[in-house]
Amino acid sequence: MAKQSKMGAAKIKKINFSWLSHHPLPRPDAAGDKDTRGVVLVVGGAVELPGAVLLAGIAALRAGAGKLQIATCRDVVPQIGTAVPEALVAGLPQSPSGGIAAAAAKNVVKRAHGADAVLLGPGMVGEEEVRALVGQVLKDVMDPVIVLDAAALEAAAKMPELTRAHGGRLIVTPHAGEMASMLSLDKDVVTQRPREIAEQAAHNLGAIVVLKGSVTYIASPDHPTCCYTAGDVGLATSGSGDTLAGVIAGLAARGTDPFTAACWGVFLHGEAGNALAKEIGRIGFLARELLDEIPRVMQRAMEKTT
């Protein structure tokens, strides 16, 4: 806890145009192709929750990733493939409850070795199956940046020896309730001390932690803690977290270092919500509507920070 106290004493960095200008995104190579902008693999979904991987996958492309693969339950492959024609959609073995079966781990690991960023968790169900899949990926997939969201979070929190092995190339994206489950805390503790809790989790897991909330904190064992304070209430909507995780994975696939990808992802997601709030209203816009805003917000931010 001594290290934790020292981290907490450091001045927090606000993610704004000044911060972004000192941490720029990779510039697209005019002579490059889709391979140079990286491959994202999104793993998740269930028969009753197919939309999460759709949102996450499109978000990765909107953030500039060159190629997208989605690995999900075999029964929903036709729907996802039709909805996201830009993606390669692979069917995985299913559990009796309609989630991805533990037996899919070998297939997922094989696909992950060909990716630059892997997003695991959106829409997944089945505690035992998720734990088996997350454990296998954390153990056998070391090169890509790995982003964990939703059901994958609590499973990963129980495997700190595996999360630490990724040397800062692992990003977890919990909201307060998920963080409380990860650390076996009351949710009120997380909401009252979000920065401290984010830094504690980053230290425990050896990972980059994006603790989502009215103020979002991005903590890492290797970087000063950052926060984004300009988000609004409309982002608290179904599917919003899947979209954020996809944006972060897409930025990481492009070659952005993981901490910078997390911070830029939070900024782009928040500013997309702010744009929709002005156009539609502070609440009532949909997570899918964030997707079209991401490239516009990213272009404006890159122009202002050049």
Image (tube, grey):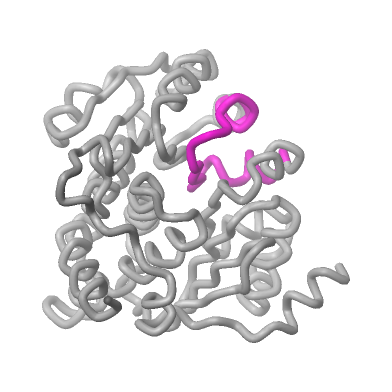
Residue at the right extreme of this rendering: 2
Q: Which quadrant would the C terminus be assigned to in this image?
A: bottom left
Q: Is residue 100 above or below residue 6?
A: above
In the shown orientation, is residue 26 left or right of residue 138? left
Please state the extent of the stretch shown in magenta in the rendering.
Answer: 133-159
In front: 43, or 118?
118
Residue 205 screen position, x and y as percent: 70, 50
Magenta stretch: includes residue 297: no
In the shown orientation, is residue 232 left or right of residue 1? left
Residue 63 screen position, x and y as percent: 26, 54
In the shown orientation, is residue 115 left or right of residue 234? right
Q: In this view of the protein, can residue 158 be seen by the observer?
A: no
Q: Which quadrant would the N terminus be assigned to in this image?
A: bottom right
Q: In this view of the protein, can residue 115 be seen by the observer?
A: yes
In the shown orientation, is residue 2 left or right of residue 231? right
In front: 96, or 128?
128
Residue 143 screen position, x and y as percent: 53, 34
Q: Is residue 114 above or below residue 170?
A: above
